Image: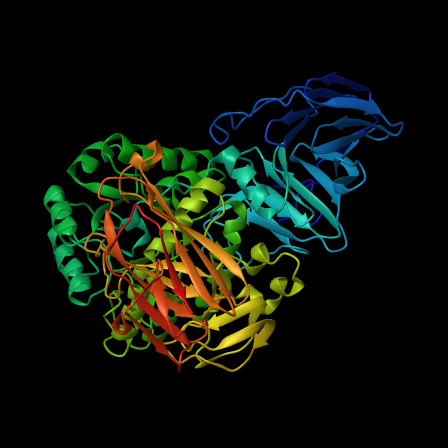
C-alpha cells in the first residue's frame, strides 16, 4: 500500500512501508525564451512559464512529461505567456527576469527561488530540492523569521497557519479541525501566494521548514506576487471570481422538508407558505426557502408554491441528493435556489466542482435570474458558483466560537460566501441561537435549518425559526435580522466588490492591518471585519460581558452607545447582555442603509436612502454605493449605477458631497430623499444643502449620543448635492 502524503515525514497515518524517495539532482539542461523555459535534472523535467498578469507557473514531473489532470475544469482559460523575459547565467544559478520578478534556477542541485525584480529581495526560496516518491511530490521552502501563512480554503476554527499543518482534501468533518471546503492554495505574508493546479489531496506543513505537497508525482503550481488583496485577486482571476448573488440571496434563508416529513408529521409542500407567513407576521426578513430539504423528501405543487413564496417576498429553493436532471423544469416552475447535498457531491474534487458549475448554469440557462447555489464540500474554483456551507453541526458555545475565524479566514482563499446554519442543525438553545444569529449578522449568507433539532434542555423536537423561543428572544432576533436588512446596500456593495476583486466582505483583522502583530493574536482571532468599516466581536460564552476585544489603529465608535475608543487598545469587561452584539465602526465610515423597518428588498421604499456617517475629525474619506436590479444578469451588460459620497471634517464643520447616481437599470429610482446620521461631528449651528439653510425641523442634534440627523427633501438621483454642518 502507499500511504497518503508519503513524502511528508510527519503526516503518515497507520503503519505501512515508506516508499523510496528521490531528490532532484544537479541541473543538466536549461533553455528557453519568450516567457517559457525548459529545465532538466536527469530524468526530472521542469518548465517555468511567465504569464501575463504577473503570474509564474512552475511544473515539474519525473516522468519527463507535463500532464494536466485538472485540464480546464478549474482554470478555464490559461493566461497568455509574457514574452518580455530574459535569462542570464549568474554562476551558481540561471536567472529568468521579468518586469516583476527574477526566478533563480540553482544548478547544484536543482532548486528554485523567486525574488523581486531587484534580485535581492527574497519572496520564496527552496531550502531542499524537490522530493518525490510513488505517493507524491514535496516542495521545501525556507521560512522567514516573521512569515505568516493563510489560506487552504475553509479550515474550521483557524485562519492563520504558522507552525501548523493544513490538510487540503475532500473532507466531511463539519466540526473544528475539519476542512470540508478546503482549497489547494495558500497565502504568505512574504508577498506571494501559490495555487496547486490539481485535484489531488495535499498537506501543507508551515513549520520552520515549509513543506507543501500533493498526493501526485508532479508539481504544477501558479505563483502570484503582491500584497494579500492583490494575491487573492490574481488567484481568483485564475480559478474564477466570486459570483454576484441576487439580493434575496443575501437575505436569510429557511430550510425544511414539507412533504411527508417523519420528523414533523403529515404535511405538504404548500405548508411552507405558513412558515413564510410567520416571517411576515413577525416582521423578520426572509429571502428564500428550501422546501424539500431532507433525504427522500419530494415536492408537489411546485409552481403554486413558488408563486406563494414570491407573494411573501421570498424565492423557491430545492435541495438535491442525487443530481440536477430535473433542474430545467424546476427553474421554469419558479426555483431560484439550489442546495447540493453531500449525498450527491460528497466525493468532492472535480465531481463537486462540476456539479456546482452545472447547478448555477441550470438556473441561468432557464431563467433571467442569477444562479444561487449552496454546497457542503468543494474545491478550488467553487467560489465562482456557490455559497460554501460548513455542514451539519451540533450547537454549543464552542460552535459559536470556532466559526468566527473559519469564515473570516476563508476570505483569504478568495471564498466570499462561507457560512453555517444559524444555531446548527441538530440542537437548539434560545440563548446560544441568539448569540449565533448575532455573530452571523454581518456574514453575507445565512440560513436556518428546521426539522432536525432537539432542545438541549428538554430533549424535545423543536423548529429553528427566529421566533420559536418567544420573548425576549423574538425581539432580539428581530433586531438583528432587521439591522442586517437595513445594511443590505452595504452588504450588496461588498458583494459587488468581491465579484470584481476576489476579496470577500468578511475579513480577519490581519487583512486590513497586516503590520499589526496583534491581529494574529488570540483576541483578534475571534473577531472579524465586515468590509473596511465594521469590527464585530461576537459573544461566544454564556456571559453578559465580553473580554479581549482588540481594536486596531484608528478611532472606533461603539455602534450602540456612541462611545469612542482610540486604537490600538484592548477592551475587557465590555457590557454585552443577551441583546447586545459588540460592534464598532471606524471613523471615516460612510454606510448606506435602507429605512428602518425594512423587511424585504421587494417592499423597501426606493424613494428613501439613509447614510450612516462617522466623522473623522481632520480626515477625509469616500464611499461608492453600487446598485442594480438585484435579481437578473443584466448587471453583467452594464445595467447598474454607482453613487459616490465623500466626507470631510475639520474645525469649520463637516461636509458631505453626494455625487449623482451614474448609470441606469430597470427599476432605478429617479429621485429620493436622504437621511444622514452623522456621528462624532461637533454640534452644528447651521445645516445647509447646496448652500441653502435647512429649516430647524429637518435636522436635530442628540448630545447624549453625539449624533446629528439630517433629512433632505426629495432630490433627483441624477444630480449631485452638498450637505454642510457648520
Which residue: 24% across, 51% down? 671
Q: Nearer the viewer, residue 118 or 216?
A: 118
In percent of width and height, residue 670 lies at: 23, 47
Left or right? Give the position of 725 relative to 262.
right
Left or right? Give the position of 678 relative to 285.
right
Which residue: 31% across, 36% down? 639
Q: Considering only vertical position in the picture, is 495 above or below 537?
A: above
Task: Tell me if I can see residue 44 in this picture.
Answer: no
**What quarter of the picture does the N terminus occupy?**
top right
Q: Nearer the viewer, residue 134 or 213?
A: 213
Left or right? Give the position of 46 relative to 373.
right
In percent of width and height, residue 214 lies at: 62, 38
In percent of width and height, residue 132 lies at: 71, 33
**What quarter of the picture does the C terminus occupy?**
bottom left
Picture quadrant of residue 137:
top right
Colour option used = rainbow
Picture quadrant of residue 302:
top left
Which residue: 19% across, 37% down? 330
Q: Considering only vertical position in the picture, is 205 above or below 73?
A: below
Q: Going by the picture, which residue comes out furthest to the right?
A: 91
Q: Considering only vertical position in the picture, is 336 above or below 178?
A: above
Left or right? Give the position of 326 relative to 545.
left
Task: Tell me if I can see residue 499 in this picture.
Answer: yes
Amino acid at each position: 500500500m502507499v500511504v497518503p502524503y508519503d513524502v511528508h515525514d510527519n503526516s503518515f497515518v497507520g503503519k505501512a512501508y515508506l516508499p523510496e524517495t528521490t531528490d532532484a539532482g544537479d541541473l543538466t539542461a536549461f533553455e528557453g525564451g519568450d516567457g517559457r523555459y525548459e529545465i532538466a535534472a536527469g530524468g526530472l523535467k521542469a518548465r517555468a512559464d511567465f504569464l501575463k498578469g504577473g503570474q509564474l507557473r512552475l511544473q515539474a514531473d519525473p516522468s519527463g512529461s507535463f500532464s494536466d489532470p485538472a485540464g480546464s475544469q478549474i482554470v478555464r482559460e490559461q493566461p497568455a505567456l509574457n514574452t518580455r523575459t530574459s535569462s542570464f547565467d549568474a554562476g551558481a544559478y540561471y536567472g529568468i527576469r521579468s518586469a516583476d520578478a527574477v526566478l533563480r534556477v540553482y544548478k547544484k542541485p536543482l532548486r528554485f527561488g523567486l525574488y523581486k525584480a531587484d534580485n535581492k529581495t527574497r519572496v520564496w526560496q527552496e531550502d531542499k530540492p524537490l522530493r518525490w516518491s510513488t505517493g507524491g511530490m514535496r516542495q521545501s521552502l525556507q521560512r522567514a523569521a516573521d512569515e505568516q501563512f493563510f489560506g487552504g480554503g475553509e479550515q474550521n476554527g483557524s485562519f492563520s497557519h504558522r507552525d501548523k499543518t493544513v490538510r487540503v482534501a475532500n473532507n466531511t468533518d463539519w466540526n473544528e479541525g475539519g476542512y470540508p471546503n478546503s482549497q489547494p492554495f495558500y497565502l504568505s505574508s512574504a508577498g506571494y501566494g501559490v495555487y496547486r493546479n490539481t485535484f489531488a489531496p495535499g498537506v501543507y506543513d508551515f513549520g520552520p521548514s515549509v513543506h507543501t505537497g500533493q498526493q501526485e508525482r508532479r508539481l504544477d503550481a501558479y505563483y502570484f506576487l503582491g500584497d494579500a488583496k492583490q494575491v487573492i485577486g490574481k488567484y481568483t482571476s485564475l480559478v474564477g471570481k466570486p459570483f454576484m448573488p441576487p439580493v434575496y440571496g443575501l437575505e436569510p434563508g429557511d430550510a425544511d422538508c414539507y412533504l411527508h416529513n417523519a420528523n414533523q408529521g403529515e404535511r405538504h409542500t404548500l405548508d411552507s407558505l405558513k412558515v413564510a407567513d410567520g416571517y411576515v407576521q413577525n416582521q423578520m426578513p426572509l429571502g428564500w426557502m428550501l422546501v424539500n430539504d431532507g433525504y427522500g423528501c419530494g415536492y408537489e405543487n411546485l409552481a403554486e408554491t413558488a408563486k406563494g413564496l414570491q407573494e411573501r417576498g421570498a424565492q423557491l429553493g430545492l435541495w438535491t441528493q442525487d443530481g440536477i436532471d430535473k433542474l430545467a423544469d424546476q427553474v421554469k416552475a419558479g426555483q431560484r435556489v439550489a442546495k447540493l447535498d453531500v449525498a450527491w457531491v460528497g466525493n468532492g474534487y472535480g465531481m463537486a466542482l462540476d456539479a456546482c458549475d452545472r447547478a448555477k448554469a441550470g438556473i441561468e440557462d432557464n431563467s433571467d435570474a442569477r444562479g444561487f447555489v449552496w454546497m457542503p464540500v468543494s474545491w478550488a474554483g467553487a467560489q465562482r458558483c456557490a455559497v460554501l456551507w460548513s455542514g451539519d453541526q451540533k450547537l454549543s458555545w464552542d460552535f459559536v466560537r470556532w466559526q468566527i475565524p473559519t469564515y473570516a479566514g476563508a476570505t483569504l482563499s478568495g471564498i466570499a460566501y462561507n457560512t453555517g446554519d444559524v444555531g446548527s442543525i441538530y440542537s437548539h438553545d434560545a440563548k446560544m441561537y441568539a448569540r449565533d444569529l448575532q455573530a452571523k449578522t454581518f456574514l453575507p449568507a445565512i440560513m436556518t435549518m428546521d426539522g432536525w433539532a432537539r432542545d438541549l434542555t428538554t430533549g424535545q423536537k423543536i423548529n429553528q425559526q427566529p421566533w420559536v423561543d418567544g420573548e425576549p428572544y423574538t425581539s432580539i432576533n428581530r433586531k438583528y435580522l432587521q439591522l442586517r436588512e437595513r445594511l443590505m446596500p452595504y452588504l450588496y456593495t461588498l458583494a459587488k466588490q468581491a465579484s470584481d476583486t476576489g476579496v470577500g466582505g468578511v475579513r480577519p483583522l490581519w487583512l486590513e492591518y497586516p503590520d499589526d502583530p496583534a491581529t494574529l493574536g488570540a483576541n483578534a482571532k475571534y473577531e472579524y471585519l465586515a468590509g473596511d468599516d465594521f469590527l464585530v466581536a461576537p459573544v461566544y460564552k454564556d456571559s453578559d460581558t465580553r473580554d479581549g476585544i482588540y481594536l486596531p489603529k484608528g478611532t472606533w465608535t461603539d455602534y450602540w452607545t456612541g462611545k469612542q475608543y482610540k486604537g490600538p487598545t484592548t477592551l475587557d469587561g465590555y457590557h454585552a447582555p443577551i441583546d447586545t452584539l459588540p460592534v464598532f465602526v471606524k471613523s471615516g465610515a460612510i454606510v448606506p442603509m435602507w429605512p428602518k423597518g425594512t423587511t424585504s428588498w421587494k417592499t423597501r421604499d426606493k424613494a428613501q436612502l439613509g447614510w450612516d456617517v462617522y466623522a473623522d475629525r481632520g480626515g477625509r474619506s469616500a464611499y461608492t454605493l453600487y446598485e442594480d436590479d438585484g435579481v437578473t444578469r443584466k448587471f453583467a451588460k452594464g445595467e447598474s449605477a454607482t453613487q459616490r459620497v465623500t466626507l470631510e471634517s475639520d474645525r469649520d464643520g463637516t461636509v458631505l458631497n453626494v455625487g449623482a447616481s451614474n448609470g441606469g437599470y430597470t427599476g432605478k429610482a429617479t429621485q429620493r430623499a436622504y437621511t444622514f446620521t452623522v456621528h462624532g461631528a461637533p454640534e452644528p449651528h447651521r445645516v445647509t444643502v447646496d448652500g441653502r439653510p435647512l429649516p430647524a425641523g429637518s435636522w436635530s442634534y442628540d448630545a447624549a449620543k453625539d449624533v446629528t440627523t439630517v433629512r433632505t427633501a426629495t432630490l433627483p438621483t441624477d444630480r449631485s448635492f452638498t450637505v454642510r454642518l457648520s
